Image: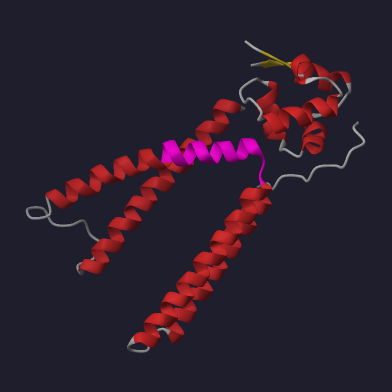
């Protein structure tokens, strides 16, 4: 075999699980920190909440960069393809659903669990779109590997 | 694009995992390359050529 320096083995399922695990742990800590220290009234509470969420996002993003640099080019291509086609497809389906609900909101009751306050409805809509995108992403990712195996 | 990866690997009695280790990619990627369903980037093509000690054009050919 070749006598050069052996390349690093790409990250597999364990690397992915570690990335998700760290991100969820930090997200949980930030949520707990916000609940414990961010409930104060006024600017201090708001600043603590913003700082906690920002720190969690930064750590999550850093974990994603570490993971992205550790996977090989075919794995990256699968994720890029899946995010473009699956994420866009999910966004389109979610968009049709949300726009239909919004346009018919005057005559049809909102689905259960959406909430009643504007903030609840806003967050529910955003999360619904994210879930549709993730579902499309997962399907497209699996499809890419099935097609390329 | 066609390639001779499977033949070259078999000549050396390497498994897909052996080749993957030398290239720094996953075994699934080697499989996708061998079946011609994934075309490598130029840097990976150069690494493949180096591992087999052959020029790129003798490993990869147009359809």
Magenta region includes residue A73: yes
- In the image, residue A71 lies at what x, y percent? 66, 45
Colour basis: secondary structure
Q: Quadrant of residue A86?
A: top left
- Residue name at image x 62 percent, y 26 percent: B38
- In the image, residue A122 lies at what x, y percent? 26, 62
Q: Does residue B9 sit above or below A60 in this rendering?
A: above
Return the residue nearer the eye: B61 or A145.
Answer: B61
Q: Say left or right for A91 vs A63.
A: left
- Residue name at image x 55 percent, y 37 percent: A78
Question: In this picture, which residue range is highlighted in magenta?
Answer: A71-86
Q: If the image is split into quadrants, where does the C terminus of chain A sit?
A: top right
Q: Quadrant of residue B53?
A: top right
* Tally of marks: 0
Q: Is residue A128 visible?
A: yes
* Dominant secondary structure of the residues highlighted in magenta in the image: helix
- Residue name at image x 53 percent, y 66 percent: A58
- In the image, residue B24 lies at what x, y percent? 76, 39
Q: Say left or right for A19 vs B56.
A: left
Q: Say left or right for A143 vs A65.
A: left
Q: Does residue A61 sit above or below A46 in this rendering?
A: above
Q: Does residue A44 sit above or below A128 in this rendering?
A: below
Magenta region includes residue A80: yes
Q: Is residue A113 visible?
A: no
Return the residue nearer the eye: A70 or A142.
Answer: A70
């Amino acid at each position: 075999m070749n006598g050069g320096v052996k390349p690093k083995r790409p990250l597999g399922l364990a690397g992915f699980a570690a990335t998700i695990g760290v991100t969820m742990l930090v997200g949980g800590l930030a949520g707990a920190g916000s609940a414990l220290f961010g409930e104060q009234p006024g600017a201090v509470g708001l600043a603590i909440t913003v700082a906690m969420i920002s720190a969690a996002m930064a750590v999550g993003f850093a974990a994603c960069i570490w993971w992205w640099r550790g996977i090989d080019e075919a794995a990256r291509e699968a994720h890029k393809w899946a995010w473009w086609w699956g994420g866009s497809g999910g966004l389109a389906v979610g968009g049709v659903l949300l726009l239909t609900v919004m346009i018919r909101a005057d005559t049809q009751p909102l689905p259960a669990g959406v909430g009643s306050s504007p903030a609840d409805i806003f967050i529910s809509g955003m999360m619904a779109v994210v879930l549709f995108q993730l579902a499309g992403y997962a399907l497209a990712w699996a499809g890419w590997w099935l097609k390329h195996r | 694009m066609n390639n001779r990866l499977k033949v070259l690997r078999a000549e050396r009695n390497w498994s897909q995992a052996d080749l993957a280790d030398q290239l720094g990619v996953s075994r699934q990627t080697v499989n996708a390359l061998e079946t011609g369903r994934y075309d490598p980037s130029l840097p990976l093509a150069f690494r493949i050529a180096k591992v087999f000690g052959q020029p790129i054009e003798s490993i990869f050919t147009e359809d």
